[in-house]
Amino acid sequence: MSVAPLTRPARLRPGARVAVVAPSGPVPGDRLQEGLDILRDWGLDPVAGRHALDVHPEFGYLAGADEARARDLEAAWCDPSVDAVICARGGYGAQRMVDLVDWAAMRAAGPKVFVGYSDITALHEAFAVRLGLATLHGPMAAAVSFLNDARTQESLRATLFEPESVMTLSARTAGVLVPGRARGVTLGGCVSLLAAGLGGPHARAGARGGLLLVEDIGEEAYRLDRILTQLLRSGWLDGVAGVALGSWEDCGPYEQEVRTLLRDRLAPLGVPVVEELGFGHCAGALTVPLGVPAVLDADARSLTLDVPALR
């Protein structure tokens, strides 16, 4: 089955209520407050989840208990006064709580904007599989990369309020790894999380017909090799229409090692591949919709959406 377009939620208007939740790692209070202030400056009405500042009593890498993190996400989504849910940060932990979410209740609540990246990839897949909903691979409210980077902030703000203004996505760093042009529906996220979700109940069976957008951080070249090889051997990449690569921060020397690996693993697919398209764990990170039909033009070094990210 090919990747199909997903339901797009409505864009935000001034005064929209936005819930900030922490499904993964713990969130410093000062950074959360700074992120809420930025959203407030945009004319939004941000509120933090009840457990947003929790820390797990035994595992300090988690933002509180799995059940509490799941209930925060669910409560925010099912609150009719909330128009969007933005994650506070990534880290690790979404996979531990995704099975505890009442997806039937979330579906009944209807479509809303959902934003996050990195570890939140596990939730992007769940939103696609369980809710049939397009989501935004974008910055998180308490992440340093969002708080300190005006370009990252502007890409998200424009996508939320004026999605027609960001229909073509590119970056000065973008390059051609494999030439060509392809049409498909966007999907993806952090490649290690996609591999970790293989065979799980909240992950799609494959990327056939899709435009795969992937990036990662802190994975040495041999681990990236293992991750990509796992996706290849499982058949998950069979029939993918094209691949857009984001940032590979702290994954080893890009020019001498990472690019060579990416070409080695992805070029045999015989589809267009664009490198360094400017999304993920990088400065000036673009907000990219997942679940939206688009054209990937490697020669033009761009991803052009058929429709705005939000209605």
Image (spheres, helix red, strand yellow):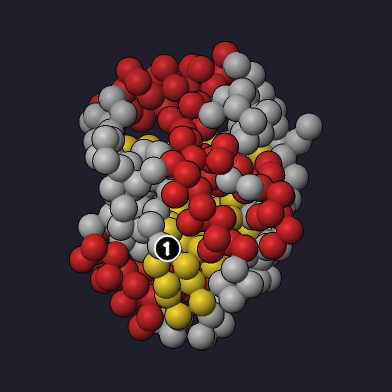
Residue at the outermost right position: 1
Residue at 75% in and 45% down? 4
Quadrant of the image containing the N terminus: top right
Q: Nearer the viewer, residue 38 or 209?
A: 38
Residue 193: x percent and y percent?
46, 33
Residue at 59% in and 51% down? 290
Residue 306: x percent and y percent?
69, 60
Q: Is residue 121 left or right of residue 89?
A: right
Q: Is residue 5 left or right of residue 74?
A: right
Q: Is residue 227 above or below residue 310?
A: above
Q: Is residue 206 above or below residue 225?
A: below
Quarter where residue 227 is shown: top left
Q: Crowding at label 1, few (<14), some or many (≥20) Cα neighbours within 10 Å?
A: many
Q: Nearer the viewer, residue 256 or 57?
A: 57
Q: Secondary structure under badge 1?
A: loop
Q: Which residue is denoted by mark 1 in the rendering?
A: 49
Q: Identity of the amino acid at label 1? A: Gly
Q: Is residue 137 above or below residue 76?
A: above
Quarter where residue 65 is shown: top left
Residue 164: x percent and y percent?
60, 73
Residue at 49% in and 72% down? 18
Residue 82 seen by the camera: yes
Residue at 76% in and 36% down? 2
